[in-house]
Image (cartoon, grey):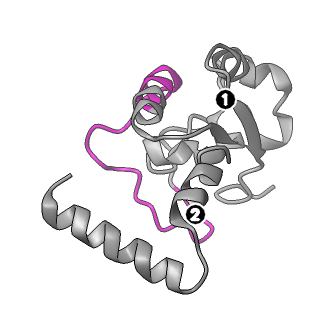
Amino acid sequence: MTTQLEQAWELAKQRFAAVGIDVEEALRQLDRLPVSMHCWQGDDVSGFENPEGSLTGGIQATGNYPGKARNASELRADLEQAMRLIPGPKRLNLHAIYLESDTPVSRDQIKPEHFKNWVEWAKANQLGLDFNPSCFSHPL
């Protein structure tokens, strides 16, 4: 750390200590608390259910940022890189629209086998999965 950053860190610790917070202990506890990363952060909520479809239902993401994952394999590789850089235990919040299938699958027809690759990947990376039903961009 730079001297200026170290000074700012020490000042912050003092201010937290003044209100009864042990910053070092809080960081130790945080290091044991799994954080669930949202899968959509790797592709701006496009998903793989209907890659050519548009997002509706109040979603504010555009799905058009350069370098976004174009398929589940790329997204998993991007997530692995992010996880190498983010400290502490992690989980993955996996949205229904990130299913994998050779043919289109309506959201009301999703089955566990559509997430087989995700489950295998999560096991290989010792990650828990949190499922999100993706209640947007579909008439349900």
Left or right, 38 with reference to 87: right
| Vertical comparison of 124 with 54: above or below | above
| Vertical comparison of 104 with 90: above or below | above
Neighbor class of circle 2 (other Cα within 10 Å; few <14, some 14-19, many 20+) is few
Label 2 sits on a secondary structure element that is loop
Q: Which residue is mark 1?
A: 104
Where does the magenta region start and end? 55-78
Neighbor class of circle 1 (other Cα within 10 Å; few <14, some 14-19, many 20+) is few
Q: Earlier in the sequence, mark 1 or mark 2?
A: 2
Q: Residue at x 61, y 19 (%)?
A: 125
Q: Residue furthest left?
A: 3
| Vertical comparison of 78 with 113: above or below | below
**Residue type, numbered disc 2:** Thr
Name the quadrant of the C terminus: bottom right
Q: Which residue is mark 2?
A: 56
Residue 106 appears anywhere in the view? no
